[in-house]
Amino acid sequence: MDSSKHSVAILDDYQGVALTSTDWSSVLNQVEIDVFRDTLSDENALVERLRPYEVICTMRERTKFTRSLFDRLPNLKFIATTGTRNRGIDVEYAQEKGISVSGTGSEGNSTVEHIWALIMAVARDIVKEHNNIRNRNPQWQTSVAVGLQNKTLGLIGLGRLGSEIAKIAKVFGMRTIGWSPHLTSERAATAGVEFIASKEELLKESDIISIHMVLSESTKGLIGPDDFKRMKPSALLINTSRGPLVNEEALIEALRSGKIASAGLDVFDQEPLPLDHPLRRQENVTLSPHNGYVSDTNYEVRTKDVCCMAIPI
């Protein structure tokens, strides 16, 4: 490592695109960059890897930065995280240690596009039909799609993402209802969504349920065992927010027992999802690897911001 340059580590670059999504040439005379495409969960291995670096650029919440990890990285001065929020970083303790933490901008439509793609994939049973054709199943058609017109879409959470999804649902002729612990009828009306006073009522009425909540201690397990009993047997559940918002064991049981018809998941309790995880074997669920924010335009915006922050002050 060149001691005359600032040392920069880019972590968790699964697709190997961090250095090609933007032009780094303006900073290469001042920094030496190492890119790591895997994620280490063992703290000792992580310390061994990261100890030399002054600047660490992390892709979303893939690597956790805890108090004990910060205590073992004496050279670290700055963390740049893609996106505006990263709950995998103990920001308060980092600041106590004199380590600055900053996020990046985002291209706003990537997650919205992915949410709707997942809704469509589940409703049309696209993955199942694709696999049947790919696996040479002689039966040409094996499923009947769920039409969206006149169906009820229940939005749990009506922030930016939920509001954008409501707009798309309107184009498809859906009835859209919304609930969250702090949602008001005025806010719902502004988004063109019918206000529902309770979670229980929303679950009973919805044909498709899409979750758009921030994970916190109060929202962990927001959808639990009793909630699946309230859903229609034909209901489709979409979670693109955070895995722990839904009780994972209860979800798997609901899928196996037919309490709900199917689910579309972009987020999980543990990521990457373990190879032996039961969700990988469950047929009536469509899975994507936390891809909501992963697009060429979004990566371009985020890596450009990271590039600008790569030289510590």
Image: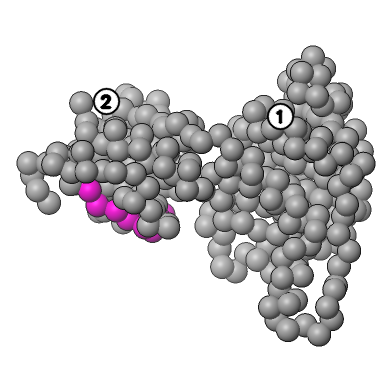
Judging depth in this view, the residue of 100 and 103 nearest the camera is 103
Q: Secondary structure at mark 1?
A: helix
Q: Which label sits on residue 95?
A: none
What residue is shown at x 48% (from left), y 34% (from top)?
A: 106
Is residue 43 shown left or right of residue 182?
A: left
What is the x, y in percent for residue 162?
70, 32
Of the residues shown, which amino acid type is indicated by label 2? Gly
Q: Residue furthest front?
A: 171
Q: Residue at x 59, y 38 (%)?
A: 109
Residue 229 visible from this viewpoint: no
Of pointers 2 and 1, the one earlier in the residue sequence = 2
Q: Quadrant of residue 213?
A: top right
Marker count (numbered): 2
Element type at marker 2? loop
The x, y position of residue 92, in whole percent, is: 40, 25
116 versus 253 height, above or below? above
Q: Is residue 39 magenta?
A: yes
Disc 2 versus disc 1: distance between alpha carbons?
38 Å
x%, y% of residue 267?
A: 61, 49
**Extent of the magenta region:** 33-41
- Residue in the picture at 80% in, 58% down: 124
* Magenta-colored segment: predominant secondary structure: loop
What amino acid type should be assigned to the residue bearing mark 1?
Answer: Ser
**Is 24 within the magenta?**
no
Residue tagged by mark 1? 163
Which quadrant of the figure has residue 276? Answer: bottom right
290 on left or right of 30: right
Q: Position of residue 8 (x, y in %)?
A: 23, 44
> Is residue 104 among the parts visible in the rendering?
yes
Which residue bears the numbered disc 2? 98
